[in-house]
Amino acid sequence: MNYTKIAGTGRYLPEKILTNFDLEKMVDTSDEWIRTRTGVERRHCVAPEQTTSDMCVEAARIAMEEAGVGPADIDMVFVGTTSPDLIFPNCATLVQHRLGIPACPAIGMEAACTSFIYALATADKYIKAGESKCALVIGAECITKLVDWSDRNTCVLFGDGAGAVIVKASDEPGIIATHLGADGQYKELLYYPVGASKELHKAGTDEASIMMTGNEVFKVAVKTLGNVALEVLEKAGVAQEELDWLIPHQANIRIIQATAKRLGLPMEKVILTVQDHGNTSAASVPMALDVGRRDGRVKPGQLVLMEAFGGGFTWGSVLMRV
Ligand code: UT7
């Protein structure tokens, strides 16, 4: 049992779809600007009463069904999110209870858009250490609840959703290598100004929203995502040409194209969801993995590289055989 292997995946997207044309009526923007600068055409938005754990539960049920596991089979729960229901209990604990999973470690991972990759890399270590046999790992966000809908610089970018995976200890090759990183010197370029212990950024108001210097984030994202992909390949002794699929964080089509180019991969080998989902932060990679597996492109045994980059900055990659 030397490997961590994906046994099932699932995704949940809220019903409401907001198109670029809808946004044209809300802020000074155009479908043309959004599509050419970001690749986004539409995104899903949660209903006001819907929470991150609601979406986690839906996505998890689908992943559990595919994996053929019941609540009693799961011995760890990880939820990567930057928009949890509450400050505490963490989302993983809410999900553990709501799914009827017997008491077990329930771990919240908070690394902005990289939260799912952090969660999966950590689950892998528990499984390889023999401390977990079957873990539920989720990336989920209600990120549209953190957006200022009058700020065209940010509101056109984001969407909501949840992606879940069941990972099991296995003799067959699964996760081969992981690589995580963070550098807080870039905090000012992308952050959310409210937490439990810090004053509001916008003094004198109770409003807050995502703060981003988009073009600066763009530059570091392109450089870092190329590096993080190459580092995990080097760690595993795998050549770029051996990759079957790149499943990147879906923030911007231009960042994805630059990463694929750096890896020498044609865009036909990249799973793209940014056009339909927008940037769903922690949910983007597990949802794209689920899309690729369920439409039959990502086949058992293939070599897949997943990677993400987010506020902090944080970054990470996972190389695996599916
Ligand atoms: O997921 C975590 C990591 N996040 C990212 O990776 C995001 C990285 N950044 C990006 O994806 C891009 O920087 C953006 C899509 C956010 C912006 O694209 P850009 O090509 O870097 O544009 P910009 O910010 O340099 O702005 C160019 C122009 C500005 O106008 P001026 O100053 O040139 O007159 C903006 O005011 O585009 C304007 N602009 C818009 N125009 C129409 C900004 N947002 C919009 C908009 N519609 N929605």
Image: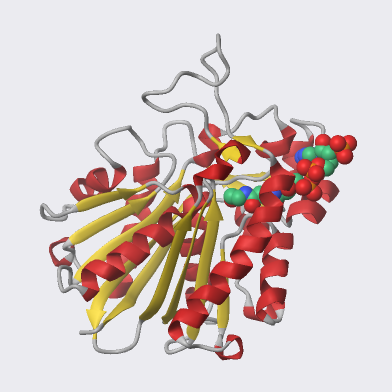
Please give the name of the residue rendered at 55% of the width and 19% of the height, measured from the top-left corner. 207
- Name the image quarter holding residue 12: bottom left
Q: Is residue 127 above or below residue 214?
A: below
- Indicate which quadrant contains ligand 1: top right
Give how far across and how far down residue 63 sits, in percent: 34, 66
Q: Nearer the viewer, residue 67 or 249?
A: 249
- The residue positioned 50% from the left and 70% from the top of the image is 306
**Quadrant of the image for the C terminus?**
bottom left
Q: Position of residue 279 (x, y in %)?
A: 60, 51
Q: Residue drawn 22% across and 51% down?
A: 106
Q: Residue furthest top?
A: 204
Choose top left, top right, bottom left or bottom right for residue 269.
bottom right
Left or right of residue 28, residue 258 in this image = left
Does residue 203 show up? yes
- Residue found farthest to the front: 185
Give the camera-side residue of 225 and 62: 225
Query: Residue at horizontal 73%, vertical 39%?
Result: 22
Q: What is the image's colouring?
A: secondary structure
The answer to whether 135 is drawn above or below residue 52 in the figure is below
Query: Quick check: 90 left or right of 262?
Result: left
Q: Is residue 230 left or right of residue 151?
A: left
